[in-house]
Amino acid sequence: MEHKKEKRNERAAIQLGLFLVGLLLFGTAAGGQLTGEEKNGKEKAAIQTSGGVSDAVEPKKIALTFDDGPHPVYTKILLDGLAERGAKASFFVTGENAEKYPELILRMQKEGHLIGNHTYSHIQLTGNNREAFRQELISTNEVLKEITGAETIFVRPPYGSWDKGFEQELNMFPVLWTIDPLDWCSKSSTDVEKRILSKARENAIILLHDEYASSIEAALFIVDELQSQGYVFVTVEEIMLVS
């Protein structure tokens, strides 16, 4: 009971602080510009009254990542949904699909999503195909550079198989994941959603694939749900900078 009472008090304090900030902004619009000193004083008063509004509303970062695309139908639907929600994502594309659908790669770049390398043909690194794997990374980088004009430094190695030697040889860095809902083996978007929501936390990296209708449906539901909980969807680069 004491904990709930504290939560209610904290929420009330936050609401009061936001109300005071609103009054400040309204007063500025209605009565002309405040001096810098007056404005700073009123903002400080609002924050102190609220018990720290800025801390209370600090968003929690989380990353959606999509492998194997782009897909000519589902990736477009996904991009439309992300744009409507103001969410960013990271797309680890294969070179062969990027060549087929360069317009989707360009749209990803234009809308602020991260574009990463997922090899050319989705090859898995093994003990005896290192050079072939390396060449697929290089080929995909060349395809993406031709489309976007930008270098690609992040790679999602298929099945998570990686050789750290590539990091120096190619100046490329692997991006794995912390939440794998196994969307590739389920046609139920609800099951995928539940698996993600049960493990969602700040700075998590969610693995999905933009070649399944159920994955797109689940992804957009997840964005809506987690945004309502105070999460902001960012590219993996932002997550890795704080890791």
Image (cartoon, grey):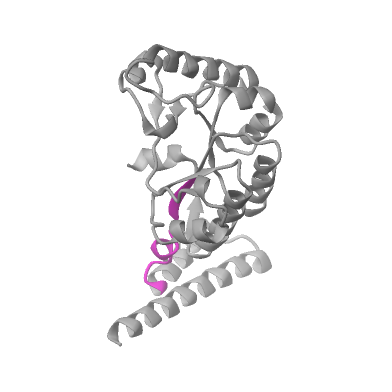
Judge from the rendering whether residue 82 lies leftward or rightward of residue 174; answer left or right.
right
Q: Is residue 144 left or right of residue 103?
A: left
Nearer to me, 108 or 43: 108
Q: Nearer the viewer, residue 231 or 214?
A: 214
Asked if residue 74 is positioned above or below residue 197 in the image, the reply reads above
Residue 98, image quadrant:
top right
Q: Is residue 135 above or below residue 14?
A: above
Place of residue 220 in the rendered image (x, y in percent of width and height, measured from the top left): 60, 54
Does residue 53 appear anywhere in the picture?
A: yes
Quarter of the image with the C terminus is: top left
Q: Residue furthest bottom?
A: 1
Residue stretch rendered in magenta on the structure? 50-64
Give left or right: position of 214 versus 11: right
Q: Quadrant of the N terminus?
A: bottom left
Q: Is residue 93 left or right of residue 53?
A: right
Task: Give 189 or 15, whichever is nearer the viewer.
Answer: 189
Q: Is residue 195 above or below residue 66?
A: below
- The percent coordinates of residue 64 (x first, y second) are 50, 46
Task: Identify which residue is drawn at 44% across, 13% down.
Answer: 132
Residue at left 41%, top 73%? 50
Image location (x, y in percent) of residue 113:
57, 38
Residue 52 on the magenta span: yes
Q: Is residue 157 above or below residue 8?
A: above
Q: Which residue shows up at 44% across the image and 80% down it?
A: 12
Tell me, yes or no, if residue 59 can be seen here: no
Instruction: Count the marks.
Output: 0
Image location (x, y in percent) of residue 218: 57, 55
Give the residue at x 53% y 60%.
227
Residue 171 on the magenta span? no
